[in-house]
Amino acid sequence: MSIYNREYMRENPGGASPGHPSRWSVITWLIVINCSAYLLSLLIDVPPKEPMAESLSLSLSGLATFKVWTLLTYQFIHGHLLHVAGNMLILFFIGRLLLQMVSPRQFLEIYVAGAIFGGVSQLLFNLATREDGLIMGASGAVMAVLLALATLIPNQSLTFLLFFIFPIKMKMKQIVMIVIIIDVLGLIFGFFASRDGTGSRSVIAHFAHFGGMLTGWAYIKFWFTRFKGAPMSRKRSQTLMERFGIRRIKEARIIDQGHKHSASPAPFVSADVDAILDKINEKGFQSLTKEEQKLLEKSSSRLSKRLDQDQ
Protein backbone atom coordinates (compact mmCIF):
# COMPACT_ATOMS: atom_id res chain seq x y z
CA MET A 1 0.00 0.00 0.00
CA SER A 2 1.33 3.43 -0.91
CA ILE A 3 1.94 5.66 2.08
CA TYR A 4 -0.11 8.42 0.46
CA ASN A 5 -3.17 6.17 0.26
CA ARG A 6 -3.26 5.56 3.98
CA GLU A 7 -6.15 7.23 5.74
CA TYR A 8 -3.99 9.13 8.21
CA MET A 9 -1.94 10.69 5.38
CA ARG A 10 -4.96 12.31 3.76
CA GLU A 11 -5.96 15.87 4.46
CA ASN A 12 -8.09 16.36 7.54
CA PRO A 13 -11.79 16.40 6.63
CA GLY A 14 -14.02 19.35 7.34
CA GLY A 15 -11.16 21.82 7.59
CA ALA A 16 -10.55 20.98 11.24
CA SER A 17 -6.97 21.21 12.33
CA PRO A 18 -5.70 17.99 13.92
CA GLY A 19 -4.28 18.20 17.39
CA HIS A 20 -6.40 21.13 18.51
CA PRO A 21 -9.15 20.20 20.96
CA SER A 22 -12.50 21.91 20.49
CA ARG A 23 -13.22 25.13 22.35
CA TRP A 24 -15.25 23.38 25.02
CA SER A 25 -13.15 20.28 25.45
CA VAL A 26 -12.86 18.38 28.71
CA ILE A 27 -9.81 20.52 29.51
CA THR A 28 -11.80 23.73 29.05
CA TRP A 29 -14.52 22.47 31.38
CA LEU A 30 -11.99 21.48 34.04
CA ILE A 31 -10.31 24.89 33.88
CA VAL A 32 -13.65 26.70 34.06
CA ILE A 33 -14.77 24.62 37.06
CA ASN A 34 -11.48 25.12 38.92
CA CYS A 35 -11.37 28.86 38.28
CA SER A 36 -15.04 29.28 39.18
CA ALA A 37 -14.53 27.38 42.43
CA TYR A 38 -11.57 29.60 43.29
CA LEU A 39 -13.51 32.80 42.61
CA LEU A 40 -16.42 31.49 44.67
CA SER A 41 -14.08 30.71 47.56
CA LEU A 42 -12.86 34.32 47.55
CA LEU A 43 -16.43 35.41 48.23
CA ILE A 44 -17.34 32.74 50.77
CA ASP A 45 -14.11 32.01 52.63
CA VAL A 46 -13.33 35.13 54.63
CA PRO A 47 -10.82 34.43 57.46
CA PRO A 48 -11.10 33.35 60.16
CA LYS A 49 -14.14 31.46 58.84
CA GLU A 50 -13.54 29.41 55.70
CA PRO A 51 -16.60 27.15 55.32
CA MET A 52 -15.94 26.21 51.70
CA ALA A 53 -12.36 25.10 52.30
CA GLU A 54 -13.27 23.27 55.51
CA SER A 55 -16.17 21.37 53.96
CA LEU A 56 -14.58 20.50 50.61
CA SER A 57 -10.86 20.08 51.37
CA LEU A 58 -9.43 16.65 52.20
CA SER A 59 -8.16 15.75 55.66
CA LEU A 60 -7.86 12.82 58.05
CA SER A 61 -10.27 14.41 60.51
CA GLY A 62 -12.73 15.08 57.70
CA LEU A 63 -12.76 11.45 56.60
CA ALA A 64 -13.13 10.42 60.24
CA THR A 65 -16.42 12.32 60.21
CA PHE A 66 -17.46 10.56 56.97
CA LYS A 67 -16.76 13.45 54.57
CA VAL A 68 -15.99 10.96 51.81
CA TRP A 69 -16.94 13.45 49.08
CA THR A 70 -13.78 15.39 49.86
CA LEU A 71 -11.75 12.73 48.00
CA LEU A 72 -13.21 14.30 44.86
CA THR A 73 -13.94 17.89 45.84
CA TYR A 74 -10.55 18.79 47.34
CA GLN A 75 -9.04 19.08 43.85
CA PHE A 76 -11.24 22.10 43.08
CA ILE A 77 -10.13 24.08 46.15
CA HIS A 78 -6.97 26.18 45.87
CA GLY A 79 -5.24 28.22 48.54
CA HIS A 80 -4.15 31.22 46.47
CA LEU A 81 -3.99 32.64 42.96
CA LEU A 82 -0.58 31.21 42.04
CA HIS A 83 -1.76 27.78 43.19
CA VAL A 84 -4.73 27.64 40.83
CA ALA A 85 -2.96 29.52 38.02
CA GLY A 86 0.04 27.18 38.04
CA ASN A 87 -2.10 24.04 37.96
CA MET A 88 -4.36 25.35 35.21
CA LEU A 89 -1.47 26.48 33.01
CA ILE A 90 0.15 23.05 33.21
CA LEU A 91 -3.21 21.40 32.57
CA PHE A 92 -3.81 23.59 29.53
CA PHE A 93 -0.47 23.08 27.80
CA ILE A 94 0.31 19.48 28.81
CA GLY A 95 -3.31 18.37 28.77
CA ARG A 96 -3.86 19.48 25.18
CA LEU A 97 -1.01 17.24 24.05
CA LEU A 98 -2.38 14.24 25.94
CA LEU A 99 -5.88 14.84 24.61
CA GLN A 100 -4.49 14.39 21.12
CA MET A 101 -3.59 10.80 22.00
CA VAL A 102 -6.40 9.62 24.26
CA SER A 103 -10.16 10.01 24.17
CA PRO A 104 -11.90 12.64 26.35
CA ARG A 105 -13.24 9.84 28.55
CA GLN A 106 -9.77 8.37 29.04
CA PHE A 107 -8.39 11.83 29.79
CA LEU A 108 -11.03 12.36 32.47
CA GLU A 109 -10.30 8.92 33.93
CA ILE A 110 -6.61 9.80 34.23
CA TYR A 111 -7.40 13.19 35.75
CA VAL A 112 -9.92 11.99 38.34
CA ALA A 113 -7.94 8.87 39.25
CA GLY A 114 -4.84 11.01 39.71
CA ALA A 115 -6.73 13.31 42.06
CA ILE A 116 -8.14 10.43 44.13
CA PHE A 117 -4.96 8.40 44.47
CA GLY A 118 -2.90 11.55 44.91
CA GLY A 119 -5.14 12.54 47.81
CA VAL A 120 -4.96 9.05 49.32
CA SER A 121 -1.15 9.10 49.07
CA GLN A 122 -0.97 12.40 50.92
CA LEU A 123 -3.41 11.13 53.56
CA LEU A 124 -1.19 8.10 54.19
CA PHE A 125 1.84 10.36 54.53
CA ASN A 126 -0.02 12.62 56.96
CA LEU A 127 -1.11 9.57 58.94
CA ALA A 128 2.48 8.33 59.14
CA THR A 129 3.80 11.73 60.24
CA ARG A 130 0.82 12.41 62.54
CA GLU A 131 -0.11 15.63 60.82
CA ASP A 132 -3.60 16.59 59.75
CA GLY A 133 -3.58 19.66 57.56
CA LEU A 134 -6.08 20.47 54.84
CA ILE A 135 -5.20 18.95 51.47
CA MET A 136 -6.35 20.98 48.47
CA GLY A 137 -5.56 21.61 44.83
CA ALA A 138 -5.51 19.82 41.48
CA SER A 139 -1.79 19.05 41.58
CA GLY A 140 -2.28 15.29 41.90
CA ALA A 141 -4.59 15.24 38.89
CA VAL A 142 -2.26 17.45 36.85
CA MET A 143 0.74 15.26 37.70
CA ALA A 144 -1.22 12.23 36.47
CA VAL A 145 -1.76 13.99 33.14
CA LEU A 146 1.94 14.88 32.94
CA LEU A 147 3.12 11.32 33.59
CA ALA A 148 0.57 9.82 31.22
CA LEU A 149 1.92 12.02 28.43
CA ALA A 150 5.54 11.31 29.35
CA THR A 151 4.84 7.57 29.35
CA LEU A 152 3.36 7.76 25.86
CA ILE A 153 6.05 9.99 24.33
CA PRO A 154 9.07 10.04 26.71
CA ASN A 155 11.52 11.23 24.06
CA GLN A 156 9.31 13.96 22.60
CA SER A 157 10.92 17.40 23.03
CA LEU A 158 8.91 20.38 24.23
CA THR A 159 9.91 24.03 24.25
CA PHE A 160 8.70 26.19 27.12
CA LEU A 161 9.56 29.59 28.53
CA LEU A 162 11.41 29.61 31.84
CA PHE A 163 10.03 32.51 33.89
CA PHE A 164 8.04 33.31 30.71
CA ILE A 165 11.25 34.69 29.18
CA PHE A 166 13.93 32.09 28.43
CA PRO A 167 13.06 29.36 25.89
CA ILE A 168 14.17 25.90 27.00
CA LYS A 169 13.83 22.68 25.02
CA MET A 170 13.60 19.44 26.99
CA LYS A 171 12.37 15.90 26.51
CA MET A 172 9.28 14.78 28.39
CA LYS A 173 11.24 12.30 30.49
CA GLN A 174 13.66 15.06 31.49
CA ILE A 175 10.80 17.31 32.58
CA VAL A 176 9.43 14.50 34.73
CA MET A 177 12.82 13.89 36.34
CA ILE A 178 13.11 17.58 37.26
CA VAL A 179 9.62 17.56 38.79
CA ILE A 180 10.47 14.46 40.85
CA ILE A 181 13.77 15.97 42.04
CA ILE A 182 12.01 19.18 43.10
CA ASP A 183 9.43 17.21 45.09
CA VAL A 184 12.08 15.04 46.75
CA LEU A 185 14.14 18.09 47.72
CA GLY A 186 11.01 19.75 49.06
CA LEU A 187 10.34 16.74 51.28
CA ILE A 188 13.93 16.66 52.55
CA PHE A 189 14.09 20.38 53.34
CA GLY A 190 10.68 20.26 55.01
CA PHE A 191 11.75 17.31 57.14
CA PHE A 192 14.90 18.99 58.45
CA ALA A 193 13.11 22.31 58.95
CA SER A 194 10.53 20.62 61.18
CA ARG A 195 13.20 18.71 63.14
CA ASP A 196 15.39 21.68 64.04
CA GLY A 197 12.42 23.84 64.93
CA THR A 198 13.05 26.48 62.26
CA GLY A 199 9.75 25.80 60.57
CA SER A 200 7.01 23.31 59.83
CA ARG A 201 6.79 20.71 57.12
CA SER A 202 6.22 21.96 53.60
CA VAL A 203 2.68 23.14 52.86
CA ILE A 204 3.05 21.55 49.43
CA ALA A 205 1.40 18.12 49.20
CA HIS A 206 4.42 16.34 47.71
CA PHE A 207 2.96 12.88 48.17
CA ALA A 208 -0.16 13.97 46.29
CA HIS A 209 2.20 14.72 43.41
CA PHE A 210 3.84 11.30 43.72
CA GLY A 211 0.49 9.54 43.92
CA GLY A 212 -0.77 11.39 40.87
CA MET A 213 2.37 10.63 38.89
CA LEU A 214 2.19 6.94 39.77
CA THR A 215 -1.46 6.89 38.69
CA GLY A 216 -0.76 8.47 35.29
CA TRP A 217 2.09 6.06 34.63
CA ALA A 218 0.10 3.01 35.75
CA TYR A 219 -2.94 3.99 33.68
CA ILE A 220 -0.94 4.07 30.45
CA LYS A 221 1.12 0.98 31.27
CA PHE A 222 -1.58 -1.34 32.59
CA TRP A 223 -4.97 0.00 31.48
CA PHE A 224 -4.56 2.03 28.31
CA THR A 225 -2.47 -0.73 26.69
CA ARG A 226 -5.32 -3.21 27.18
CA PHE A 227 -6.90 -1.60 24.15
CA LYS A 228 -3.91 -1.96 21.84
CA GLY A 229 -6.02 -3.70 19.27
CA ALA A 230 -8.60 -0.91 19.09
CA PRO A 231 -8.34 1.27 15.97
CA MET A 232 -7.40 4.88 16.59
CA SER A 233 -9.60 7.68 15.35
CA ARG A 234 -8.48 9.50 12.20
CA LYS A 235 -7.89 12.74 14.09
CA ARG A 236 -5.65 11.21 16.77
CA SER A 237 -3.84 9.07 14.21
CA GLN A 238 -3.08 12.16 12.11
CA THR A 239 -1.89 14.03 15.18
CA LEU A 240 0.53 11.31 16.16
CA MET A 241 1.88 11.13 12.64
CA GLU A 242 2.58 14.85 12.77
CA ARG A 243 4.17 14.56 16.21
CA PHE A 244 6.57 11.90 14.95
CA GLY A 245 7.20 13.82 11.72
CA ILE A 246 5.98 11.14 9.33
CA ARG A 247 3.60 13.50 7.54
CA ARG A 248 6.64 15.43 6.32
CA ILE A 249 7.08 12.64 3.78
CA LYS A 250 4.32 14.38 1.83
CA GLU A 251 6.55 17.42 1.47
CA ALA A 252 9.08 15.38 -0.49
CA ARG A 253 6.59 15.04 -3.33
CA ILE A 254 6.63 18.75 -4.14
CA ILE A 255 10.40 19.22 -4.13
CA ASP A 256 11.80 20.03 -7.55
CA GLN A 257 13.19 16.83 -9.03
CA GLY A 258 15.92 18.86 -10.69
CA HIS A 259 17.22 20.02 -7.30
CA LYS A 260 20.80 19.14 -6.50
CA HIS A 261 19.75 16.78 -3.71
CA SER A 262 16.62 14.89 -4.61
CA ALA A 263 14.42 14.19 -1.62
CA SER A 264 12.44 11.23 -2.82
CA PRO A 265 10.80 9.57 0.17
CA ALA A 266 11.77 6.08 -1.01
CA PRO A 267 15.18 5.90 0.74
CA PHE A 268 13.60 6.93 4.02
CA VAL A 269 10.54 4.69 3.99
CA SER A 270 12.16 1.31 4.46
CA ALA A 271 10.22 -1.93 4.57
CA ASP A 272 10.39 -1.88 8.38
CA VAL A 273 8.97 1.64 8.59
CA ASP A 274 6.30 0.81 6.04
CA ALA A 275 5.23 -2.16 8.16
CA ILE A 276 5.05 0.07 11.23
CA LEU A 277 2.81 2.54 9.41
CA ASP A 278 0.50 -0.31 8.40
CA LYS A 279 0.39 -1.45 12.01
CA ILE A 280 -0.60 2.04 13.19
CA ASN A 281 -3.34 2.20 10.59
CA GLU A 282 -4.77 -1.17 11.63
CA LYS A 283 -4.26 -1.28 15.40
CA GLY A 284 -3.46 2.26 16.54
CA PHE A 285 -0.30 4.01 17.69
CA GLN A 286 -0.52 2.52 21.17
CA SER A 287 0.13 -0.94 19.69
CA LEU A 288 3.74 -0.05 18.84
CA THR A 289 6.62 -1.39 20.88
CA LYS A 290 9.36 0.91 22.18
CA GLU A 291 11.71 -0.35 19.46
CA GLU A 292 9.15 0.44 16.75
CA GLN A 293 8.60 3.94 18.14
CA LYS A 294 12.36 4.59 18.14
CA LEU A 295 12.66 3.38 14.55
CA LEU A 296 9.78 5.65 13.55
CA GLU A 297 11.39 8.66 15.22
CA LYS A 298 14.77 7.93 13.65
CA SER A 299 13.29 7.61 10.17
CA SER A 300 11.26 10.81 10.44
CA SER A 301 14.30 12.68 11.80
CA ARG A 302 16.41 11.62 8.82
CA LEU A 303 13.71 12.73 6.41
CA SER A 304 13.25 16.08 8.15
CA LYS A 305 16.97 16.85 7.94
CA ARG A 306 17.08 15.96 4.25
CA LEU A 307 14.02 18.07 3.47
CA ASP A 308 15.46 21.03 5.39
CA GLN A 309 18.66 20.81 3.35
CA ASP A 310 16.82 20.67 0.05
CA GLN A 311 14.41 23.52 0.72
Image (cartoon, helix red, strand yellow):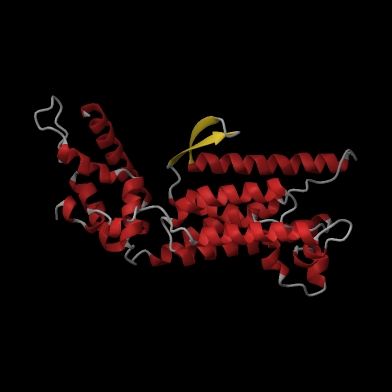
Residue 307 visible within the image: yes
Q: Is residue 11 above or below residue 300?
A: below
Q: Position of residue 221 (x, y in %)?
A: 47, 58
- The image position of residue 61, as x and y in percent, is 83, 66
Q: Nearer the viewer, residue 294 or 256?
A: 256
Left or right for 91, reference 277: right
Residue reaching furthest to the left: 258
Q: Residue furthest toward the top?
A: 260
Q: Provide residue 272's location: percent of width, then percent of height.
A: 22, 48
Residue at left offset 37%, top offset 58%: 286
Looking at the image, is 309 positioned above or below residue 268? Answer: above
**In percent of the image, x 21 and y 40: which residue is there?**
251
- Left or right of 116? Residue 50 is right
- The residue drawn where x is 79% and y is 62% is 44
Task: Tell me which corner region of the image, top left, top right, bottom left or bottom right, holds residue 78.
Answer: bottom right
Q: Quadrant of the N terminus?
A: bottom left
- Which of the image's four quarters has the C terminus? top left
